[in-house]
Amino acid sequence: MNRKTVLPAVAMTAVSMVLTLAVVVMWLGAAVPWPVALVVGLGIDGGWLATLAYERRLAAQGDHSNAVTAVGWCFGLVAAGVLVAHALTADDSAAWLAVAWLPVAAKALWLVHGLWERTALTPAALDAIRGIQQEARDEAAVARARLRAEAATEETRLTAVTGAGARVARVQAKTAHTLAGAWATLETARSGEGTGRALTSVTARVTPGVTPRWDLPVWGPVEPVPALPEGPALTDDALDVVVDEIRHSEDPALSYREMASRFRAAGHSASEVRLRAAWKRVV
């Protein structure tokens, strides 16, 4: 993994140093003897390379020096300045300006390589991080699946309850309509003149001298029947025991609906959610 950043930095450094030396020799060789120009070029490249080597040594020891870094950038800027100055005085300025940024680019690549080294992790740490991330993704997927399943179950339950309530409401409305018609018929019979004379003639034979008034039976409020006291709520363990006993009361074992109906018929009390949870635990 280290080669991904060190190889481009080394290649860029070599190209920039060769280019700087060649430009210095060509540019200053016309004004001074070429050995002097060679020494100047090697001095720039040597200072550049020496500061880079010292920076790498400090990085290997886990240390850093701002002064050395500043000197290294100064040498890089001097090399870039030499290339820019040569490009401005040369005939083909555009071509030389296109490569004048190479020393600065080489320093930037070494900076990126240093940041890579300071943030690099061992393969064991990377494996641990991947394992943690995968575990988190698995838990999130399981949680989403559980929520979707619970939502679908709740939607089915609400649909069933709503349908049953609608059927009960329709039956009650039909019964109320029929009962209202019956009471209307009784009221018509009570208020009719012929019916009153007929009832009077019948009661006169039974009780002479008395003409009772025939009234409709009163359909008024009644006293509510007190509900039976509910027993104490079963604990989860006791509920599991009762559900298991009812389920295995026959062979093969009962289904959930059969168990639930027998559970209610036996006088036990538990919510549908707790009963389903106990069924899942037992099964």
Image (cartoon, grey):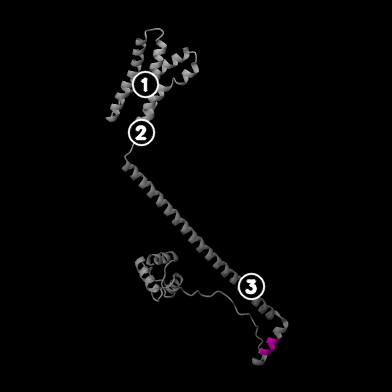
In the rendered image, residue 201 lying in the magenta stretch gets the answer yes
Specify which label sits upstream in the sequence, 1 or 2: 2
* Quadrant (top left/top right/bottom left/bottom right) for the C terminus: bottom left
> Is 255 rendered above or below residue 46?
below
Q: Does residue 112 show up?
A: no
Q: Nearer the viewer, residue 29 or 201?
A: 29
Marks 3 and 2 close (CB-CB < 8 Å): no
Q: Nearer the viewer, residue 66 or 81?
A: 81
Question: Quick one: SS at disc 1?
Answer: helix
Specify which label sits upstream in the sequence, 1 or 3: 1
Q: CA distance from mark 3 to mark 2?
A: 89 Å
Residue indicated by mark 3 = 177
Residue indicated by mark 1 = 73
* Residue 3 circle label: 2
- The magenta segment is 198-202
Percent coordinates x, y for residue 92 in the rendering: 49, 15
